[in-house]
């Protein structure tokens, strides 16, 4: 689907055949960065995200940006939920919802890293929503700078600048979270 194509007043049922391949490519890109032990496959991630997106009835999408933000958020929630579940099982099911399994460990797993990024991203969403949207689209949806620029209607240079700022902010937030947990 080209960036200029409109999804206006398309129902979820009409939309799936048009965006399935692109969603699958985005999920595969995201999953390629995960560990070899990852049990969730890109097709399963797309299907679960689609169920979440269309599960609230026959939704209509305002435009491409609206749909792909919702898809990226759904994928983020699925991956974070799975990471939390795995961390809880690893800890014998005794871990609190907001407790981090990574603190006190020298090496962190991809799932633990995902939970740390998610917490930092929630903080960034409050401080700089524009940069947080770019992180969401790049990290969780796997979009390139060009795709993010087209989706958000900004220049590639703007995306590059906000991505650099967001990475630095997230790095600092992760350090703060780790330092607070070490105390």
Image (tube, grey):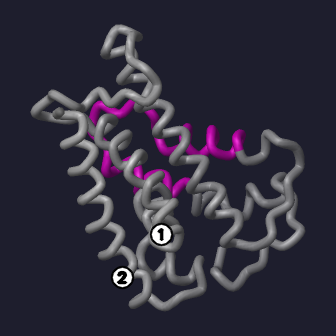
Q: Any mark on residue 9, and which? A: none
Image quarter of the C terminus: top left
Query: Magenta region: which residues?
Result: 24-52
Residue at 71% of width from left, 40% of height from top? 51
Q: Position of residue 43 (x, y in %)?
A: 54, 43
Secondary structure at badge 1 equals loop
Tell which circle, 2 or 1, labels the residue nearer the N-terminal end: 1
Where, by quadrant of the figure, is residue 99 drawn?
top left
Rendered position, 8 above or below 68: below
In the displayed orientation, state which residue is furthest to the front.
183
The total of numbered circles placed on residues is: 2
The image shows residue 157, relative to residue 18, as above or below, that is below
- Dot 2 alpha-carbon crowd within 10 angstroms: few under 14, some 14 to 19, many 20 or more: some
Residue 80 x %, y %:
46, 38
| Position of residue 75 measured from the top left corner of the image (x, y, whole percent) | 55, 47
| 90 and 100: which is toward the camera | 100
Which numbered mark, 2 or 1, is in the foreground of this view? 1
Task: Tell me the number on the disc at residue 128.
Answer: 1
Q: Are marks 2 and 1 in contact (CB under 8 Å)?
A: no
Q: Residue at x 29, y 42 (%)?
A: 113
Residue position for label 2: 160
């Amino acid at each position: 689907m080209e960036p200029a194509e409109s999804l206006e007043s398309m129902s979820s049922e009409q939309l799936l055949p048009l965006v399935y391949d692109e969603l699958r490519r985005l999920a595969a890109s995201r999953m390629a960065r995960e560990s070899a032990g990852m049990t969730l496959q890109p097709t399963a991630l797309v299907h679960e995200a689609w169920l979440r997106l269309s599960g609230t009835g026959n939704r209509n999408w305002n435009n491409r940006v609206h749909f792909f933000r919702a898809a990226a958020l759904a994928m983020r929630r699925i991956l974070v939920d799975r990471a939390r579940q795995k961390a809880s099982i690893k800890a014998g099911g005794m871990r609190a919802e907001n407790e981090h399994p990574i603190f006190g460990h020298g090496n962190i797993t991809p799932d633990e890293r995902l939970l740390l990024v998610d917490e930092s991203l929630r903080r960034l969403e409050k401080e700089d929503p524009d940069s947080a949207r770019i992180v969401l689209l790049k990290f969780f949806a796997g979009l390139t700078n060009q795709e993010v620029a087209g989706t958000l209607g900004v220049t590639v240079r703007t995306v590059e600048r906000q991505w650099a700022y967001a990475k630095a902010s997230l790095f600092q937030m992760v350090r703060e979270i780790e330092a607070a947990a070490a105390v």
